[in-house]
Image (cartoon, rainbow, N blue to C red):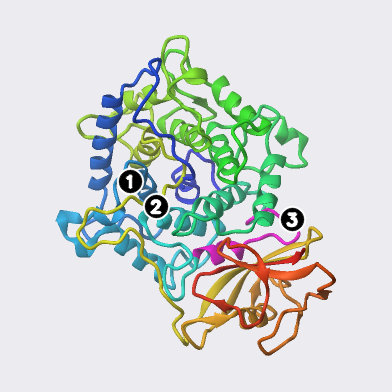
Amino acid sequence: MSRPRTPARLAVCVPVALGALALAVLPASATSTPAQLATSKTNGVAYLKSLQAADGSYAGSGLSNEWAFSAFAAAGTAVVDVAPGGDTTKNARTVYRDLLSTASWPSASPVVTDYERGALNAYAAGIDPARVSAARNLIADIYASWQTAEPGYFGPSSNFNGTVFAALALRGAKTRTGADRIPQALTDSLVTRIRANQHVDGGWTYQKAEGNSAVLNSASDVDMTGAAMAALCVSGVPDTDTDVVQAKNFLKSTLVSTSGAFNSLYGVNTSSNGWGVAGLNACGFNAQTGDFLTGAGKTPIDFLIANQYNPGGGFKYKPSDTVPSAYSSIDALRAVAGGGFTTAPPVPVTPGAPQWVAQSGFTAGTATKLALTVDDGAGNLKVCSVAFTPTGTTTTLGDVLSAAAGAATPSGCVTSVTPASGTGTITAVNGKANSGSGTWKVSVDGSAFTGAARSKVINVGDTVALRWGA
């Protein structure tokens, strides 16, 4: 992965509710007024709408503007309502879903952050990321990059950002009913790795720091600190947690009193400030007051708004620039609107447009994938993407586990299941048998764990978790 201040960094890393901090009502000490915030959001949304291509697209091959979807959602604009010239047949959500559904997306050599970017923006657009189409399950695509030799990392551990954005996507992109779709054991493994990579100064960079004292003692950057602290908070870590507080204090330590800007490793700029504020938003910290109101009476929000062109709505990358930057505008608007790195989609205003779209069932004969975890109760968590071709609109747990034994990425997720056929209760997985109160149970999309039977119905896009325990 390239240095975070390059366009490539923006393409693969974020953008990406994680929670949102409501900014409609602000304490008296806040410097940007509700009216100023409302104007900034209105004009910012107008600018992002101007980035839409004539065919309705924001994304294509290579670098693209799809991160705008997370900013739209944070600002209260449904992506399905964004259409060129009012042509609803070319609305941004439908065009993006069609792109994600193509076999050639994202590229011939995809990396895990491609799928994480897709999941975060699909969610913000109102596309269930696990049910984009009969063949596309972005949650399963992310699971495929689990590092068996380094549990808790997604993608090469040297590119730590892949693990941060795995947490943002897997925990931030919830089910359509707002449930956490992944099991707690997987969340815990992600949180453990994020904590292990926190630098001594309280922040993070995109590089792996765990086990490397030189990196752990090196300077952090504002960008990845915002993303990593958001990843912790969206994973259920409270804002009073020591590591979260240290991250907040790191951001505070970089404040420039006269402008309210964070002084990042890449200098003062709106994109870094946007990421830093998004981290604060995700953790419920108000970037307009308290620790983030400088002695000169400025805040990070003040800095962002000061670098916005009005009424054009675009934001400059650096204060010295003379034209707006698309990427900086996306980062800045998301932050000003109170967003983290993704937000649940607003209710559309387009007549007949649903809040969510999702594949309703498997298509017989169309190859697909499902996300699967197997937890033996002894700390040996296995995570994989299971490839199979369904024969009907639903399948069964037994068939999924049989497929996992031969077509899972990474391999070894399932090595044996007892019974190996039929519809009965599952009594052993990977050689570990039911014993007393310790039995194999199954959860789907974060539901309560119940007794696992081969006949359990599995639907398209279900995130399947097996667990041995009482």
Label drawn at residue 150: 3
The residue type indicated by label 3 comes to Glu
Q: Which residue position holds label 2?
A: 124
**CB atoms at circles 3 and 2 under 8 Å apart?**
no
Instruction: Name above or below for residue 28 compared with residue 283.
Output: above
Instruction: Name above or below for residue 420 compared with residue 31.
Output: below
Q: How far is disc 3 from disc 2 in space, using C-alphas?
A: 30 Å
Instruction: Name above or below for residue 396 compared with residue 122.
Output: below
Q: For label 1, count other residues whose C-alpha is less than 10 Å away and answer few (under 14), some (14-19) or many (20+).
A: many
What residue is shown at x 74% (from left), y 33% (from top)? 214
Q: For label 2, count other residues whose C-alpha is less than 10 Å away and answer few (under 14), some (14-19) or many (20+).
A: many
**Secondary structure under the numbered disc 3 in the rendered image:** loop
Instruction: Give left or right: position of 334 versus 311.
Output: right
Q: Position of residue 459 (x, y in %)?
A: 51, 75
Can residue 361 be seen by looking at this rendering? yes
Q: How far is disc 1 from disc 3 in space, using C-alphas?
A: 36 Å
Indicate whether residue 375 is drawn in magenta: no
Label drawn at residue 450: none
**Secondary structure under the numbered disc 2 in the rendered image:** helix
Instruction: Give left or right: position of 295 versus 451.
Output: left
Instruction: Name above or below for residue 184 compared with residue 25.
Output: below
Q: Nearer the viewer, residue 243 or 214?
A: 243
Q: Position of residue 249 (x, y in %)?
A: 60, 24
Can residue 219 be seen by looking at this rendering? no
The residue type indicated by label 1 comes to Phe
Q: Which residue position holds label 1?
A: 72
Q: Provide the residue span drawn in magenta.
A: 138-154
**CB atoms at circles 1 and 2 under 8 Å apart?**
yes
Q: How far is disc 1 from disc 2 in space, using C-alphas?
A: 8 Å
Mark nearest the camera among 1 and 3 is: 1
